[in-house]
Amino acid sequence: MNILQLTLDWSEVWALLIPLFVLLINTKQPAIFKPVVWYVIIAFIINLGGNIIADYKTELHLPEWLQRNVFLYNLHSILRYACFTWFFLLIKVPFVVRINRYISIFLLLFIIINFSLFEEFNSGEHISGKLLTIEAFVLLIYCIAYYLNIMGEEQQSEKYSGEFWIVT
């Protein structure tokens, strides 16, 4: 296999080694970064598992249900939403705090209905575009709400804090 192709195939794994390395060096992180730290660790494990399944399923003699890694990417989407919603709640974006309960209930109902009636959680064909779309839309709304919130704040010096760079 071409080394460039191998590097590209595993980029979703090795790219997460950069923030993991930074976290190993700077072990003391503010409490509000806890959801992001958890996300980086979870994403690394899920992406590593997904690539191992994709590249070594034959050699590892995995059971039939593990012949596809789609369920890991759908799980990744759900956990990304959970971690970043937790983050937005910790930084106390007023809009997110007010509306999160309703959005989370809607997303939970969507996941249950979608994977019960319309799509397989571990489809052999594709990851759930509907799930990814709704997750991305909600997180985008949360980011916009954060930016609108900091634009309305009086203190200019804190606008470019750690939270700002994570949201960006």
Image: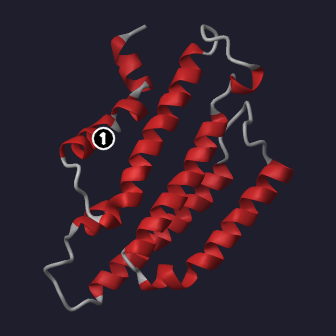
Image label count: 1
At 48% across and 59% down in the image, what residue appears?
Answer: 83
As drawn, is 49 to the left or to the right of 58? left
Q: Residue at 35%, 30% (x, y): give it.
A: 14
Disc 1 on helix, strand or loop? helix
At horizontal 62% and vertical 73% (from top left) the residue drawn is 103
Residue for point 61% across, 77% down: 101
Residue 35, placed above or below residue 121: below
Q: Taking 159 as reference, is 6 above or below it?
A: above
Left or right, residue 168 beside residue 83: left
Q: Quadrant of residue 56?
A: top right
Relative height, residue 97 to residue 36 (above, below): below
Left-right relation of 75 to 108: left
Q: Is residue 50 above or below residue 136?
A: above
Taking 124 as reference, is 31 left or right? left
Image quadrant holding the C terminus, namely bottom left
* Of 88 and 31, the residue lying toward us: 31
- Residue 128 picture location, percent across and down: 67, 46
Position of residue 152 measured from the top left corner of the image (x, y, whole percent):
29, 90
The percent position of residue 73, horizontal first and vertical second, equals: 59, 40
Residue that mark 1 sits on = 20
Q: Look at the image and tell me in which quarter the N terminus lies.
A: top left
The coloring applied to the image is secondary structure
Quarter location, residue 165: bottom left
Q: Residue furthest right?
A: 117
Q: Residue furthest left?
A: 157
Q: Residues within 10 Å of mark 1 (few under 14, many from 20)?
A: some
Residue 46 rendering spot, x and y as whole percentages: 52, 37
Amino acid type, callout 1: Leu
